[in-house]
Image (cartoon, rainbow, N blue to C red):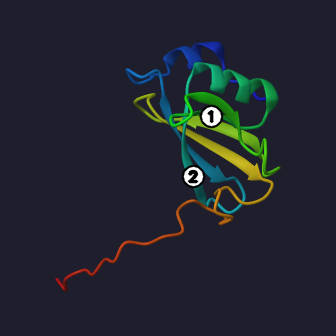
Amino acid sequence: MITLEHSNVDELKYGSDGLIPAIIQDSRTLQVLTLAWMNAKSLQRTLASGETWFWSRSRRALWHKGETSGHTQKVVEIRYDCDADALLVLVEPRGPACHTGETSCFYRKLPFHREPS
């Protein structure tokens, strides 16, 4: 079980939709795995179970990462930013994070060319 001090949880600022963005990062490699959304209930379930739970905006339902794929994420640490409106969840992934089978959801690149200064 993971714990956040009760006072810390009370500091979190959810959006008007009741959600807070959660950046999921591999605790060993520091690779960003995905960006997901949490509400108070999914955060509570994450803290209680030690594995990530999210709010699916498309399905409008809670979901446990790896529920169908088996690719769960064991939570190592949860941090929040200086404005208390975003979470950083460090995990030990058990399989790929992306539903496409990629390790990270951030596997595509936009073309970018910097002009010489």
Residue in view at x 72 percent, y 59 percent: 28
Q: Please name whichever residue, 100 or 108, is drawn nearer the observer in this view of the structure.
A: 100
Residue in view at x 45 percent, y 28 percent: 84
Residue 50 placement: quadrant: top right
Say whether residue 68 is left or right of residue 62: right
x, y percent for residue 49: 80, 29
- The residue to which callout 2 is attached is 34
Label 1–label 2 contact, CB within 8 A: no
Query: Which amino acid type corresponds to the residue marked 2 in the rendered image?
Result: Thr
Residue 17 placement: quadrant: top left
Disc number for residue 54: 1
Q: How would you rate the neighbour count of disc 2 (Cα within 10 Å): few for under 14, some for 14-19, many for 20 or more? A: some
x, y percent for residue 70: 83, 49
Residue in view at x 57 percent, y 59 percent: 105
Query: Which amino acid type corresponds to the residue marked 1 in the rendered image?
Result: Phe
Disc number for residue 82: none
Residue in view at x 44 percent, y 30 percent: 85
Residue 84 drawn above or below residue 71: above
Residue 20 drawn above or below residue 99: above
How many tags in the picture? 2
Quadrant location, the N terminus:
top right
The mark that comes first in sequence, 1 or 2, is 2
x, y percent for residue 40: 58, 20
